[in-house]
Image (tube, rainbow, N blue to C red):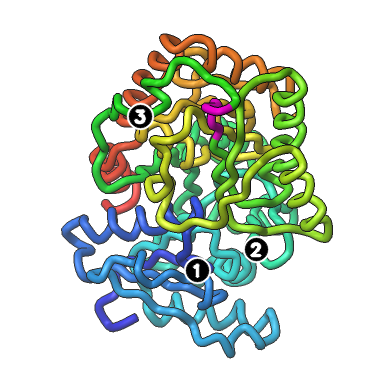
Amino acid sequence: LGPDVKALVTVPWVGVGGADIVSLNYARAIHRSTPYAGKTRILATFLAERTKPELIPTDIGFVQLDPSWLGLEPHLQRRLIAQLFVLARPEIVVSVNSFHVTNALQAFHRQMRERTRIYTTLFAFDRIGAGYPVNPITDDAQRGFLDDIAGTITDNTATARIIGDILALDPERVLVHRQPVMDETPSLNESTHAFTDVDFVDTKPFRLLWPHRLDEEKSPATLVALSKALRDNGMPARSGVWGQRVLGSDGETLMTDLEDAGVVYRGPYAGGLATLPTDQYHALLLTSKSEGLPLVLVQSMLLGLPVIASDVGGVSDIVEDGKTGLLTAGPDDIDGFVRSICSLMRTAPLRRDLIRQGHQRAAELHGWPSFQLAVERSIAF
């Protein structure tokens, strides 16, 4: 870490998901604050092979713990993380879904926070399967340290309210930071297929983008049911899936079901939604069972792609039904998804209004200047 480390962003790894974007956002924002320029580091504690080094800014130090430490007993892992904090003694620590840090805080929070302001993150109340980090502070037995650290960060007001209710935290210690998703906010592109196309037939269908990891929380089964319903109703709409396969025991069955429903799996992608041919699609689908505020929705709006989403978690923080996007009652509301798709197919003016207002909302709430200011006001100084 070096002798001059003053700010630390801790993560399991730095990859391509929403939490990875968040961790890089905090590292950049803190590094850009004058007291911490050149003194900010990212510390990764888990699976080194999942880190994408090319995503990490070259002017921010990155440290990966030696994989051998993962073979230690849990109580030794907790002690070593606590000792690292005590020896390095950074002024600020932002722990982004870093379950090793959370585990250490359970036993050693008083020692770790002495002369260090520690912030944990909580973006959604969910668990996403074996091999992926969960948020331990949602468990009753593991909340004791929350009153002893500087605060808990989330990215939307809906989750902030839940945190206040369930974890009984003082509202002043729950920070809402709306995350930027691009270095620069793009101007609205009015030459996309979503903006210009009017008529849809089987040879030129309405194209739906589903760009999420394939796991239960994202409810790909909803996409299967929806695609069948669209086909049964004779609607010229086709879905394409981009995302990492994070499948359970029924994974191959799901892939077969998607194929049988006419859904095309395009494969995984890295670098955010901007790396996909979003200009060739007409709408983005989010069918999740639970969410915080999915940054893919922000990216979609900035790229001029209207969204149809389950009204779960913090989604309604950015998707105002009929104004900045369309909402359904949840992943089981197949009829609601069908109606929304039908509206966008048949009413080009509605689609264009959603695109314009969605872009404006995303640009206002999720730009870098407002995020940088929020971090400097509530964390850095």
- Relative to 148, say whether 84 is above or below: below
Inspect the image, locate mark 1, and give the three-letter code of the amino acid beneath it. Answer: Trp
Left of 171 or right of it: where is 91? Answer: left
Task: Work out how far the residue at label 3 is from the one at label 2, CA to CA, in angstroms.
Answer: 36 Å
Reading the image, the residue beneath label 3 is: 192
Residue extending farthest bottom: 68
The span shown in magenta is 203-208
For disc 3, the neighbor class at 10 Å (few under 14, some 14 to 19, many from 20) is some
Secondary element at image label 2 = loop
Q: Which residue is mark 1?
A: 13
At which x and y percent is residue 370? 27, 37
Q: Residue at x 52, y 71 (%)?
A: 50
Coordinates of residue 129 in the picture (x, y in percent) = 72, 58
Which circle marks residue 213 in the picture?
none
Say which residue label 2 marks: 132
Circle 1 Cα neighbour tier, 10 Å, few/some/many (<14 / 14–19 / ≥20): many
Q: Nearer the viewer, residue 229 or 93?
A: 229
Q: As rendered, which of 340 and 143 lies closer to the eye?
A: 340
Q: Residue at x 28, y 53 (%)?
A: 29
